[in-house]
Image (tube, grey):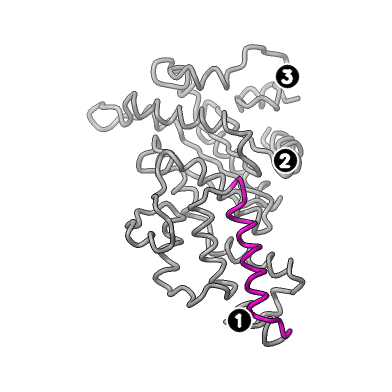
Amino acid sequence: MEQDLVSFLTREYLDGYIKDGGSKVKFFTAGERATVTEALGALAAAAAEAGYTVARVDAASVARINLFSHVYQAAVYELDLAGLVAGYCWRLVEAFGHAPAAIPPGMDFMSWAAEVHGREPEILCREVRARLERDLFRNRFMNRSFATAVLHLAADELGVREGGLDPEDREVLLAWLRGAEVPLRDLRRFHVFRRVDRYNARFMLRSLAELARLAGRTGLFLAVEGLEVLLAKREGGRALYGRAARDEFYESIRQLIDGTDTLAYLMVVLGFTRELVEDERRGLHSYEALWLRIQHEVAGRRVNLFRDFLDLDAVRAGGGG
């Protein structure tokens, strides 16, 4: 089952629609958690092979899954953000007609280009800055604050930032990109005036996908599993997430679905056991604005794998097409 499903999704989405600049949110459910985990793992492996930056999140390990900023933080935590910035810089160097591998370790592009190729520093600096502004500030898929932080890091990497960044400042910017609680006073000098929060996290995710593309990756693949934790209870029987918290998460996903036309190079797959579907009082049914977008009313002999909501048990039993 997993092989056929993953082959289909790879062909139609990872190697097709998403690679060409599209975005998609899909839902995987099954009776057993292991079935969901296996399918998401296989699809994540296929995404990595196809050149995507891949992030996997276990909802149970997120402090408050209802806050989409926490989903973003968990996704970014395992990624090499500095590596993505460096990858973007390498592609920029290539765009200026040079091979990044030719630059000696510990030497920035500006110094190397001036010393080895006789490039006029002032002119080259102006050209590089113009390219950074075009790729980042004028990029409609980039949140302005995200673009600002990446620009500072990239300019330092390339040697076009006057004075450079000290290690502490570099870590402040990377921490902010990860969604950490960085004091605003440490950010203002970089012209970043807002933390990552529940309201802008979706746009930060969009920006992350765009950074991955600029770094030479195919896009961003994000898998979030274990969402049945929304129905979990604490010791003593009290709900781990109340109705307001659950609705907040459902609304965030509804917004993500409705905003797919404003996203690019991004695939998100959300996985959960069937109890999140069957519990009409607390599960997906309880938030009509989301359920109306993902339910399917027409059932055929074969499962339509283009459907956004896929029951993996039904795929296994009936095949897909």
Please say if the residues under marks 1 and 3 sit with CB atoms less than 8 Å apart: no
Q: Earlier in the sequence, mark 2 or mark 3?
A: 2
Does the residue at mark 2 contact the one at mark 3 (Cβ under 8 Å)? no
Q: Is residue 276 magenta?
A: no
> Does residue 214 appear to the left or right of 95 in the view shown?
left
Specify whether 155 is left or right of 174.
right
Q: From the image, tell me which residue sits under label 2.
A: 10
Check residue 302 in the rendering and tell me which mark sits there, or answer none.
Answer: 3
Q: Classify 10 Å Cα crowding around label 3: few (below 14), some (14-19), many (20 and above).
A: few
Position of residue 188 measured from the top left corner of the image (x, y, whole percent): 38, 59
Tell whether 316 sits left or right of 281.
right
Residue type of the residue flagged with mark 3: Arg
Q: In this picture, which residue range is highlighted in magenta?
A: 117-141
Judge whether 254 appears above or below 46 on screen: above
SS class of the residue under badge 2?
A: helix
Nearest to the observer: residue 271 or residue 111:
111
Which amino acid is tagged 2?
Thr
Asked if the magenta segment contains residue 129, the reply would be yes
Which residue is more in the foreground, 200 or 318? 200
Q: Nearer the viewer, mark 2 or mark 1?
A: 1
Q: In the image, which disc is placed on residue 105?
A: 1
Disc with the residue nearer the chain's start (2 vs 1):
2
Does residue 19 sit above or below 4 in this rendering?
below
Q: Where residue 218 appears, x then y in whole percent?
A: 69, 51
Question: In what quadrant of the picture does the C terminus appear?
Answer: top right
* Magenta stretch: helix, strand or loop mostly: helix
Amino acid type of disc 1?
Pro
Q: CA distance from mark 2 to mark 1?
A: 37 Å
Q: Which is more toward the observer, 296 or 293? A: 293
How many C-alpha atoms fall within 10 Å of the one at disc 1: few (<14), some, or many (≥20)?
A: few
Taking the spot 69% from the left edge, 64% from the top edge, the residue there is 91
